[in-house]
Image: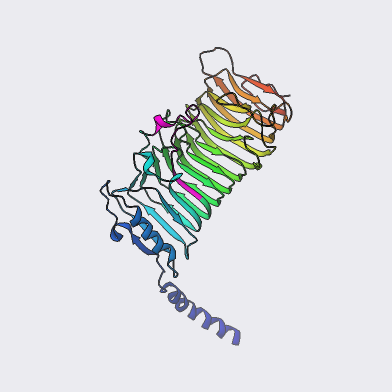
Amino acid sequence: MTSIVYAFKTLCLLPLLFIAVASRPTVKPKVFNVKRHGSIPDGKTDNTDAFIRVWSRACGRRSGSSKIYVPKGNFYLGGVEFVGPCKNPIEFVIDGTLLAPENPSDIKQDTWINFRYINDLSISGFGTLDGQGKKSWPLNDCHKNPNCPKLAMTMGFAFVNNSNIKDITSLNSKMGHLNFFSVHYFNITGVTITAPGDSPNTDGIKMGSCSNIQIFNTNIGTGDDCIAILSGTTNLNISNVKCGPGHGISVGSLGKNKDEKDVKDLTVKDIIFNGTSDGIRIKTWESSASKILVSNFVYENIQMIDVEKPINIDQKYCPHPPCEHENKGESHVQIQDVKLKNIYGTSKNKVAVNLQCSKRFPCKNVELIDINLKNNGLEGGPSTAKCENINGSASGKMALQHCLN
């Protein structure tokens, strides 16, 4: 009887407990509206100092989280760095347009908007980062002009962890759009990246020495790699990405510099390449300065629409010959454990699968499964594959003349 009375009392108290919990006030972030802190959205006034003041206040706040809000309007912004560590999580919501200087020399740093040494950073909103790169692109000729000016990337993240960016649009960068260095546990979702197909070196997303990066539901059309994956990057997951125009999703180039690190554990799924120069691409320098491992890659469910080189492993990469290093000869980058499954669509070249590996370090355990790439180029006949110095297998439905046993 005692237990029944106790249970009845407990049931009676539950609604009161629920009301007490539900009535607790939700702690909202303190909002820092940049307009209320001196920023002027006229597209002309330099708001750099005003943005830095807002960041300092938001980052230094000790109780609760902070939210920096950029409302609609055109906010001209010179080169700016937002540096932590911060005392609390930071939301950076951009609904307006941030305008970079047209003159590249007016940005006195490598990256126009740079975030460094920050944890728990969230960048969101339906605004635009306008790099105003059109006047800078003709200056991007460093491969033939040693006195070329240094152009800034649009937005960079260095030593930033447990953070994310979503829904933002990056437009017409001077160089690359989004750059990541030593960033860990970062999500990129719903981002749109746009520049003309003939804009030089405007990589969409570029990362090195990063880990546990997720890229989802993102549209990238640019003049260079849609996504460039560089030395030391591991545990990268890319899915539901549309790429075009551009140079595809590229690993590398690798091996050019000493002390480069392994690249491993890459998953690329549910991708559409439309009119790109490359689709799946791994590129290493023919004469390597470093010996590293590229391993455990999975590419699956990928559509190619008139792609010039749908699948391209190039271990003789040399864009502007001659390319010489201390260790001349074959690439020292070892590629192994690469699975390509359900890759389909059309190729603008008869050779739809190019697997050109290093003679000294042949590719190992490369699997082709269900490859259905049709030749849609000027040269007639069915699609083919080219293999050099590679060990692997082909299985499933193969709609091309493959070269793996």
Report how many numbered discs are placed on residues in the image: 0
- Asked whether 144 falls inside the magenta stretch, the response is yes
Q: Nearer the viewer, residue 393 or 146?
A: 146
- Asked whether 12 falls inside the magenta stretch, the response is no
- Residue at the limit of the structure toward the front, as seen here: 147
Query: Which SS type dominates the magenta stretch?
Result: loop
Residue 281's spot in the image, x, y percent? Answer: 58, 31
Residue 190 visible in the picture: no
Residue 316's spot in the image, x, y percent? Answer: 63, 26
Q: Is residue 86 left or right of residue 7?
A: left
Q: Which of 263 and 151 is in front in this view?
A: 151
Q: Nearer the viewer, residue 26 or 126?
A: 126
Q: In this view, does 20 lie to the left or right of 252?
A: left
- Read off the magenta span: 136-157
Colour scheme of the rendered structure: rainbow
Q: Residue at x 40, y 55 (%)?
A: 92
Q: In which quarter of the image is residue 233?
A: top right
Residue 282's spot in the image, x, y percent? Answer: 61, 32
320 over 54 or under it: above or below: above
Q: In the rendered view of the protein, which quadrant contains the N terminus?
A: bottom right
Residue 229's spot in the image, x, y percent? Answer: 57, 39
Q: In the rendered view of the protein, which quadrant contains the C terminus?
A: top right
181 over 309 or under it: above or below: below
- Residue at the limit of the structure toward the top, as seen here: 380
Q: In which quarter of the image is residue 245?
A: top left
